[in-house]
Amino acid sequence: MSGGAPPSPSVFRHPVDPATPRLLMPLARALAWVNSAVVALGMVALVVASAVLTSSVVSRYFLKASTDWQDEAAVFCLVGATFMCGAFVQAIRGHVGIEAVVAVLSPRANRLRMALVDLMSLAFCAFFAWKSWTLLHEAWVDGQTTSSSWAPPLWIPYGLMSVGMTLLTLQLLVQVTASVRRAAGMAGAH
């Protein structure tokens, strides 16, 4: 480990954009709270996945024991952490970006670029969320399971994916509406 100080609890809280329309302000506040709670659970899921995989390696190597359930359990934890924490990462604008483009654009062009990227991301994530809910429904109705001998139900990862993509879509909706208000010069008017 780096040996640095642990992250401040304020890392898990982010302010609601004041340009958010009043109608969406309760949603923005709820998302901020949910995102903070989910990122803490995501950290727990990563620790659990690490512990499960470590125990799998130890039991396979030293005890020569079969561990067919551990890989899938770790994957379920990783799927949950990845999808459920996406909205938090978006809220703090932590997704990967290309800084070279930002450096050559004017501030106005950069705001327009961010608004367009957010709008395209919103459309993609809304479609992805809808398809995820479709997969969840099919897995639930058909009783789908994985093909392993453990055979956990597939509605678990599909459910995590559906909820996570829905949270990400809602976060993008709040950010897009705030960007539109800011671009229209209405950020101060409520």
Image: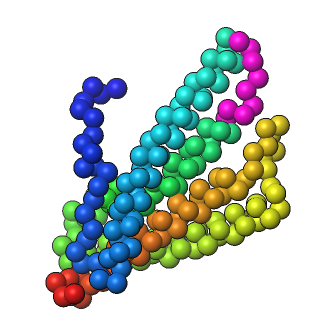
Q: Quadrant of residue 178?
A: bottom left
Q: Looking at the image, can residue 9 be seen?
A: yes
Image quarter where the C terminus lies is bottom left
In this rendered view, identify the residue nearer to me: 170 or 38. Answer: 38
Segment tinted magenta in the rendering: 63-71
Which residue does the image show at 18% across and 88% down from the upper left?
189
Image quarter where the N terminus lies is top left
Residue 151: image location, x then y, percent? 79, 43
In this rendered view, identify the residue nearer to me: 130 or 34. Answer: 34
Residue 43: image location, x then y, percent? 44, 42
Residue 70: in magenta span: yes
In-image side of 174 versus 9 (left or right)? right
Query: Taking 44 as reference, is 115 above or below it?
Result: below
Residue 98: image location, x then y, percent? 33, 58
Q: Looking at the image, can residue 117 be seen?
A: no
In-image side of 186 versus 57 (left or right)? left
Query: Taking 41 as reference, is 67 above or below it?
Result: above
Residue 78: image location, x then y, percent? 56, 44
